[in-house]
Image: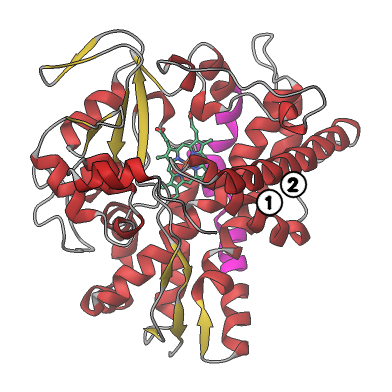
Amino acid sequence: RRVVEPSIVRYFAWRGDPVARWMRPQSKGDPYPLYEDIRRRGLVRSSLGPWVTASHATAETVLRDRRFSSSPVHQRGYQPPSFPLGDPRAELPAGDLLTLDPPDHTRIRRLVSGAFTPRAIAGLEPWIRERAVRLLDQADARGPEFNLIDAFAFPLPIAVICHLLGVPAEDQDKFRAWGHDVVTTLEPQTSRAARHHSQASEIALAGYLRDLVAKRRSDPDDSLLSALIAVEEEGDSLTSAELVSTALLLLVAGFETTVNLIGNGTVALLGERAQWDRLCKEPELISGAIEELLRYDSPVQMTSRTATEDLEVDGTVIRKGIPVIVSIGGANRDPAIFAEPGRLMVDRPEAARHLSFSLGIHHCLGAALARLEGRIAIEELTSRFPGLAMAGTPVRRPLLVLRGFETVPVRAAA
Ligand code: HEM
């Protein structure tokens, strides 16, 4: 879908405004020089309203400070959405873990996190590996060239999250289209038509999950969804609306990001052949290499927080109601933390200090699962196809918040 570029963005970009420059379509290919520029200027205020930081230390301060909120309700001038009677958008879940503040956030996160303990996740390894091998068998059988995203990087995480939630895997193609649309709502600038399209997909997905919740209420199985329906702790349980918003977030967060860890990671490694070859010869490095791949080209490039009171950060006063955009991709390339940050080094000792899973109360709930899927994907790819090579130019999705590829043509060779 075409991204509209408002003339105000063009104007401020021309004036050198960092956020406006970042929002321009042409920055999306390689935003890293822009992040460097922002970092050099410290905490900067955009003429478009928010502050922005690409410094690791400042990002850490903002993400850990509970006086900054993820909820849009604290933004100056916030208007709650209001829809005409009967408008299906009124049925959309009002908020999810990502945008809730304590105490609701604490309560829901506590109820959900039981399913994501390291032990529970580690138990999924045989299932994920078997699925990864099967997908590569199918890709191999189709011929020496395939699109890594369609054949592997996308179907693996969606199969995993569908398996976990107890969602029929045959619906996964539908989810891909819905998920792609839903994540465009995270983008700061989309056309009205695109916004409507995204909302229509969100309504369809929420409706699908609402039906599934109803079905599982009367006919429970051993899935995460049934466990979430049954969960009750200290008298707390999830309401129906919370169940739908949590399932929707888990489903979309479960595949729209991990696909990019596998896709971006493979492209980065094939672009630095010596690093790929090293993983083929020393597979014990793969676990650590996943941290470096997450750092080097993070699937989630930015998040934001809003000051709930007047606050001072790095000697700068951030007024109540003003958002701070945290450039995760920029923090991950901060030379104060990462030596030669533009270089991919699979054995980089400080790689795990990346902020790709964020920090503080919203730290990614699925981090252990994403790491496991990433490790299995790279282990299976390197062991089966050490001679894997690019077979064309990969095509990026033109997004600002999520960073990944639509197509990655590869040629498989053992
Ligand atoms: C939150 C990144 C995979 C579920 C987050 C946040 C980031 C992130 C940056 C926090 C955003 C913020 O602070 O504003 C990633 C990346 C992934 C990944 C890079 C893959 C490489 C997953 C998976 C799942 C998942 C596989 C679920 C199965 C969640 C949930 C939250 C979250 C539920 C909200 C947590 C909260 O607000 O308390 N993720 N994620 N993520 N992620 Fe992930």
In the picture, which quadrant includes the C terminus?
bottom left
Above or below, comparing residue 358 to residue 190 in the picture: above
The answer to if 119 sits in the magenta stretch is yes
Image-based side of 250 in relation to 24, left or right? right
Above or below, comparing residue 219 to residue 414 in the picture: above
Question: Is the residue under label 2 in contact with that under label 1 (CB below 8 Å)?
Answer: yes
- Label 2: how many Cα within 10 Å (few below 14, some 14–19, many 20+): some
The answer to if 112 sits in the magenta stretch is yes
Q: Quadrant of residue 281?
A: bottom left
Q: Residue at x 29, y 43 (%)?
A: 20
The amino acid type found where label 2 is placed reads: Gly
Which residue has dot 2 on it? Answer: 166
Q: Residue at x 36, y 25 (%)?
A: 305
Where does the image place residue 360, in percent across and percent down from the top left? 35, 26
Q: Secondary structure at mark 1?
A: helix
Mark on residue 353? none
In the picture, which quadrant includes the N terminus?
bottom right
The amino acid type found where label 1 is placed reads: Cys
First to last magenta residue range: 111-132
Residue 353 in view in this figure: no
Which residue has dot 1 on it? Answer: 162
